[in-house]
Image (tube, helix red, strand yellow):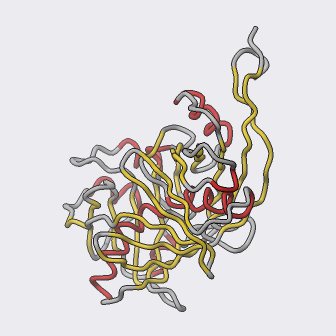
Amino acid sequence: MGGIILRIPIYQVDAFTSKAYKGNPAAVCIVDRRLGDEVMQDIAAEMNLSETTFIQPLEEVSLAGIAQYSIRWFTPETEVPLCGHATLAAAKVIFDCLGFQGERILFKYVNGQLESRRHAGGFTMGFPADEPLEAGPSSDLLEAMGIRKYKELVYGRNTGKLVVRLHNEVEIRELRPNFERMKSVKVCFPVKGVGVTAEGQAGYDIVSRYFNPWAGVNEDPVTGSVHTVLAPYWSAILGKKELKALQASQRSGELLIRIAGGGRLEFIGDAVVVMKGEISAGRGDRL
């Protein structure tokens, strides 16, 4: 019978909001050694949030001086290649809970690195822009989502996210997808989540929602990664280099996006820590 082998500091953070219990909740685990993929997946399933992120310091200095971390993201069912709100949650924890006094944090992941800094509106994060490509219709998938009419379909070249442009915000808010049907539909190209979007109102440039039942997240409250497709798409349509975005989920959340040039975007958003503690990771019946 094995016993507990690790007690991992963990924080729950509501991202892309300045109000507790709004925005998108993420768990942030701070580890001092490499964990097995199975352990991280088990923890993410236990937390049962849209994403749990694992960060590990990469410099052999005290916590207050660390500027570089490795980062990985897991849904309750699978690892994902990129997650905006959980990265923002990690930046919030490092700056405000671990007492980091430097100017920037570099998060290194398998496809590169992301940078975060403090900002008057919370924190900035640098992300790669994705190229929105014209996509062919997938009538079965659209029917499963309850979409009969739309203005345009685009597909993120790198993220694999399908985006459906609807006519207005009312259509966005009233949409009621059938998630089980969505999962059973066969699409002729790999779809790693579906966003719906329209031009915004009441001070917002764009509005959206995002669904990814294939990864165990029927609707994500606020999604940074889909905005890597939405930002260049809407920037070209509206002729703007700065976009205020609303994700109209039940919890709702917002972010400011700047087109930084060179294929890069700058996301600006706030976050609130709502819980902190420890989670046990080990083996045997005392886990």
Position of 185 relative to 246 (above/below): above
* Label tally: 0
User: Residue at image x 33%, y 82%?
Assistant: 235
Closer to the camera, 238 or 83? 83
Question: Is 131 positioned to the left or the right of 12 in the image?
Answer: left
Q: Quadrant of the N terminus?
A: top right
| Identity of the residue drawn at 73% across and 73% down | 19
| Residue 162: image location, x then y, percent | 32, 60
Question: Is 105 drawn above or below residue 217 in the view shown?
Answer: below
Q: Residue at x 21, y 62 (%)?
A: 135
In-front residue for pair 278/247? 278
Does residue 54 appear in the picture of this structure?
no
Q: Which residue sits furthest front? A: 61
In this rendering, the answer to whether 8 lies above or below 50 is above
Residue lying furthest top? 1
Q: Position of residue 165 (x, y in %)?
A: 34, 73
User: To which quarter of the image does residue 238 belong?
Assistant: bottom left
Left or right of residue 109: residue 90: right
Q: Quadrant of the C terminus?
A: top right
In this orientation, which residue lies closer to the viewer: 157 or 32?
A: 32
Question: In which quarter of the view is residue 284 placed?
Answer: top right
Residue 55 vs residue 233, the one in the foreground: 55
Q: Is residue 150 left or right of residue 255?
A: left
Inspect this view and state whether residue 277 appears. Answer: yes
The picture places residue 20, in percent across and down from the top left corner, at: 75, 67
